[in-house]
Image (cartoon, rainbow, N blue to C red):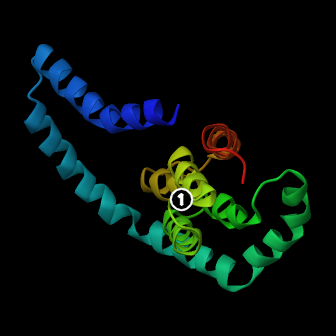
Amino acid sequence: MYELISYASVWAIPLILATILVYGMYKKVPVYESFTEGAKEGFGTAIKIIPHLVGMLVAVSIFRQSGALDMITSLCKPLLDLLHIPGDILPLALLRPISGAGALAVTTDIMATHGPDSFLGRLASTMQGSTDTTLYVLTVYFGAIGIRNSLYALKVGLLADVAGIVASIFIVTMVFGVV
């Protein structure tokens, strides 16, 4: 199973990119010009999102530095032990919907402490790739285009994050074994 997943993961992204290019050529779309036009629009969007980005980074920093993350982690530890889920993964699960940089810092710490080929390293990598920075996306991108009512998107995004976290734990346990 591990070899099959490794083989599929090596070829997945190049295959997707090649499919997009071939489909664009088949539809006679100027692929490179479309790419550069999209990149120009992305620069303007990047300028618009800077205030929202700064606000989100400050909020994440306050969340981590205030000790709220550590308090939540210690409160949930008995339940995680009961479910045989390593408690070291909880900070990543809590931070990932809020901040990609914060989640990456936690993942880096897990890798440095336990190693990338450990169960926790594989679980952190899978969780990092299976979830998204939902609150960041809503704050920055919805703020950039002026969407104020994002309640349904928030609910669906957080539900997708929970599904990604649960699926990560289940799949990594099935493929790589128990802790």
Q: Residue at x 71, y 42 (%)?
A: 166
Direction from residue 96 to residue 79 in the image, left or right: right
Residue 139 at x, y = what percent? 54, 58
Q: Quadrant of residue 133?
A: bottom right
Residue 144 at x, y = what percent? 42, 55
Residue 58 at x, y = what percent? 56, 79
Vertical arrangement, residue 54 with respect to residue 175, above or below = below
Q: Quadrant of residue 24?
A: top left
Vertical arrangement, residue 137 with respect to residue 173, above or below = below
Residue 113 at x, y = what percent? 58, 74
Residue 4 in sight from this viewpoint: yes
Direction from residue 92 to residue 77 in the image, left or right: right
**Residue marked by disc 1:** 136
Callout 1, which amino acid?
Answer: Tyr
Q: Secondary structure at mark 1?
A: helix
Vertical arrangement, residue 145 with respect to residue 17, above or below = below
Q: Residue at x 52, y 54 (%)?
A: 125
Q: Residue at x 34, y 32 (%)?
A: 12
